[in-house]
Image: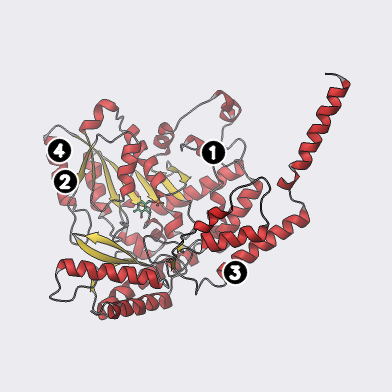
Amino acid sequence: MSALEHTTLVDRIRQLEREAQPLEPGTAERELLRHAVMESSERFLRNIETLKAFDDSEDKGIGLLQAPISERGIPLEAALELLEREVVRPGGNPASGGHLAYIPGGGLYHSALGDYLAAISNKYAGLFFTGPGAVRMENMLLRWVADLVGYPATAGGNIASGGSIANLAAIATARDAHGLKGRDFASAVVYLTTQAHHCIEKALRLAGLEEVQVRYIPIDERFRMRPDALEQTIAADRGQGLKPWLIIAAAGTTDTGAVDPLDAIATIAERERCWFHVDAAYGGFFLLTGHGRRVLKGIERSDSVALDPHKSLFLPYGSGIVVVRDARWLAATHRYSGHYMQDALREPGEISPADVSPELTKHFRALRMWLPLILLGTEPFRAALDEKLLLARYFHQEIQALGFEAGPPPDLSVVTYRWAPPGVSLERANQLNQAIVDGVRRDGRVFLSSTLLDGRFTLRMVALSFRTHQRTIDLALRILREQVAAIGA
Ligand SMILES: *Cc1c(COP(=O)(O)O)cnc(C)c1O
């Protein structure tokens, strides 16, 4: 390289450094950014009690597209204004205590700050070699969850992005633990109920198991798996030369919050040598309460459990946990290697998340869970969950006082109910309940959802957010009364 070429090269490098400089804001600039972002989050949180739980806007955030990604960027105020108007406002508001639809959770402030700190250090949480503290934190939280479930010291797990992925990891693990190969799929049988979350069937397909036999075990009048029917079905399958393989129970179904009889199912699974998986994505952290421990008894006898901290531990979306009784099975399913990993693989120590999950580089998810737990302890979580259990019972009583027909007393914190005055046909009742849930959504102060149970259009109320209190439930009851009046019933 000539001297002139060298000078040109160095000039060009320096010029590019200057042009890339906006990527590294200085102290004063950071202060401005932080202040504006904090102001935006405070505008939201200071008004959270009165913000709509559902904003049924016409435009659905379309205005966002008027600001395309460009060469020069736009001012911070304009970007935050766009965010608040086009993203935060329209649709459901999962941070609101009035979000009583689907399965809420809320989103703890401490977790938001944990995410902020995780992104600042950008600590690598995939491998013990480069992120020993981050990996210890994840494993410590997984041990805490395994203890909550009642698993022995052999247990291990992974903090994934949600319940769907946690269930997928458990199902893939169950496949390999039983040595199922392609030729075995058509004779392997999985047992669940029609109340299982649809992500279970998605996971079976993703795990290459679309061809397995799926048996929907009859449910009792409270939507729980019937152990006697499970036994009969397994016996019939054995009689046909099929291979009972996997039993999936729910510790809180999404639809009605029903908890399958886990202890009785565990006994059958042990005897039949089936892998026993419990989908506790909704109900898992009720194990922090005395009531939850009683209702979920038997979960400690399972082989794997999925739990969602972004539901019953109130974390923001993006946190699901799988724990497996024997961590070696989880590791066997997710083993990998690569020449570029040779430094990391030499390092002994804790289990690395990358060895027990499909992910390599991952969000440092543990910090958003650790920060609220280490700062607050478990006591306020237990109180909030016990409060939700009682709020569900309270709603179950009061909704009947309003003349609604209520579903079974809640196992956890989901209540089903419908408006079905005597003499009204099923078809008409379905229309009326559709009108009620649509009316509630248009009103927007609370957000309720519906489902179909045995062909009946049924309304649901789920108390799970840490921001849902008695005044929220009373407001929901008032709005339901208004809606019933509005449909002229
Ligand atoms: C929410 C839920 C899932 C799915 O979990 P995601 O976190 O939404 O992926 C699975 N099973 C049950 C019982 C659930 O409530």
Q: CA distance from mark 1 to mark 3?
A: 42 Å
Q: CA distance from mark 2 to mark 1?
A: 40 Å
The circle drawn on residue 300 is none
Query: Which amino acid type is shown beneath numbered disc 4?
Result: Asp
| Mark in the foreground, 1 or 4 | 4
Tell me which label, 1 or 4, sits earlier in the chain: 4
Image quadrant assignment for residue 429: bottom left
Mark 1 lies on residue: 350
**Is residue 470 depicted above or below 67 in this figure?**
below
Mark 2 lies on residue: 231
Tell me which label, 4 or 3, sits earlier in the chain: 3
What residue is drawn where x is 42% and y is 58%?
311
In the picture, which quadrant includes the C terminus?
bottom left
Question: Which of 48 and 293 lies nearest the eye of the viewer?
Answer: 48
| Mark in the foreground, 2 or 3 | 3
* Pointer 1 local density, CA inside 10 Å: few below 14, some 14–19, many at least 20: few
* Pointer 2 local density, CA inside 10 Å: few below 14, some 14–19, many at least 20: some
**Is residue 25 depicted above or below 42 in this figure?**
above
Query: Which amino acid type is shown beneath numbered disc 2?
Result: Glu
Mark 3 lies on residue: 43
